[in-house]
Amino acid sequence: MKKAMNRKYIFWTTYTIIIIVLWGLMTWTSHLNFKETESSYFDLELSNFKGKIESILKTYESFSNYIFDDIKSDSYILSHIREAATASDEEKKILRQELYDYLIVKYEHMTKYKFRQLHFQLANTESFLRMHRLDTYGDLLYDIRDSIKIANETDSYVSGFEEGRIFNGYRFVYPLHDNNELIGTAEVSISTASILEILSDLYPAQNFKFIIKKSEVQDNVFEEEISNYTDSYISENYYFDREVTEIIDNTTYLKDFDSQSFFSKIKDQYEEQINNNENFVINCQYNGENYIVKFLTINNIVGQPVAYLITFLGTDEHADIVKGYIKQIIFFTVFTISIITFGWAISFYQSKIQNIAHIDFLTQIYNRHIF
């Protein structure tokens, strides 16, 4: 009888181990599915964010093309750019003022649509006329502005994000020709502030931030213009653009929101990824609410990551995914415990029945069935 009991014990122990292994496989599979679902959700959120920005930029690029079409066929503009290439400093000053006066109405109309700059450069990349800063000119941009360098060297249109001598922004740089000869470039640009202002208007429940690498600013911006930037509390290696920060922080949703406290609390979740220039999304909690924070890298003209656009939104969507995962694990665990308990209960009652069959009730000794 002892051998039979040992066999049963080995059987039910093996049964229990198999059930636990199956539970492990089910929970591991559930974990993998959860991670895949979470990753897909984060990828979709990041893709949607990127798509919104690209849509805005595409619209402004079309508008910029329209502006340039008017410029490239204007003989007055082209003649002034051509003459400036060989003019003396005094002659350039006159040409610059004449061109400024000629374009000021057009430029002011552009700014109403959130364009920041209309800038002309000569073929040697010398800044000839900045409509936004008439008194800042003459600096060579070959080693500072890749967009202007590439546009002049390749005689082709160039677009993308770039830090300049005064402001950063998305640049649309066009080669200028007169009688089929390259005489310089014309640049139309929109500021990052304008893009985020549009996003804030379209999506008022979302919060937006912009940070740019300190090295990018320090290597390119005029020393007297560094005051346009301030240290970022999001990362010690990045600046805030003052204009962007003022516009975004004055939106209705952000007035009562402590962004500095928010990012300080979640810094450990994103710091390594920012230092690695990654695109990523994190889920976090702040003051009892769930948030999704999206970090999108901004590459410059030559593809180097130099800044981040960040958006964060209070949402329970990710929390619902987590809850679904936890419910699955609880179900698998309760189901497994139930099966194991049921199995051992059967074993217990089988043993009890066998004891009743083999032991005399009155004498409590084995009866004749055991022999």
Image: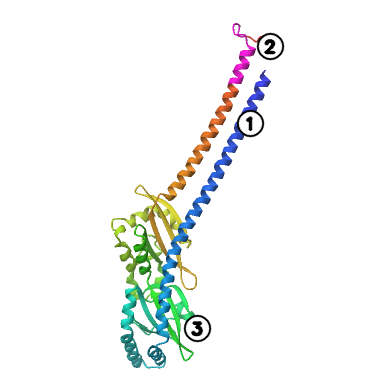
Residue type marked 3: Asp
Compared with 344, 252 (above or below) is: below
Q: Is 363 contained in the magenta span?
A: yes
User: For the residues marked 2 and 3, what is the alpha-carbon distance in whole angstroms?
Assistant: 105 Å
Compared with 325, 251 (above or below) is: below
Q: Which mark is residue 369?
A: 2
Residue neighbourhood size for the residue with mark 1, other residues' Cα within 10 Å, grouped as few (<14), some (14–19), many (≥20): few
Q: Residue furthest right?
A: 371
Per the rendered image, the range of residues in magenta is: 349-364
Q: Which mark is residue 14?
A: 1
**Of the image marks 2 and 1, the number of the one nearer the N terminus:** 1
Residue 289 is situated, as x and y percent measured from the top left of the image, at 36, 49
Asked whether the beta carbons under mark 2 and mark 3 sit within 8 Å of each other, the answer is no
Q: Which residue is mark 3?
A: 155
User: For the residues marked 1 and 3, what is the alpha-carbon distance in whole angstroms?
Assistant: 77 Å
Residue neighbourhood size for the residue with mark 3, other residues' Cα within 10 Å, grouped as few (<14), some (14–19), many (≥20): some
- Asked which secondary structure carries label 2, the reply is helix
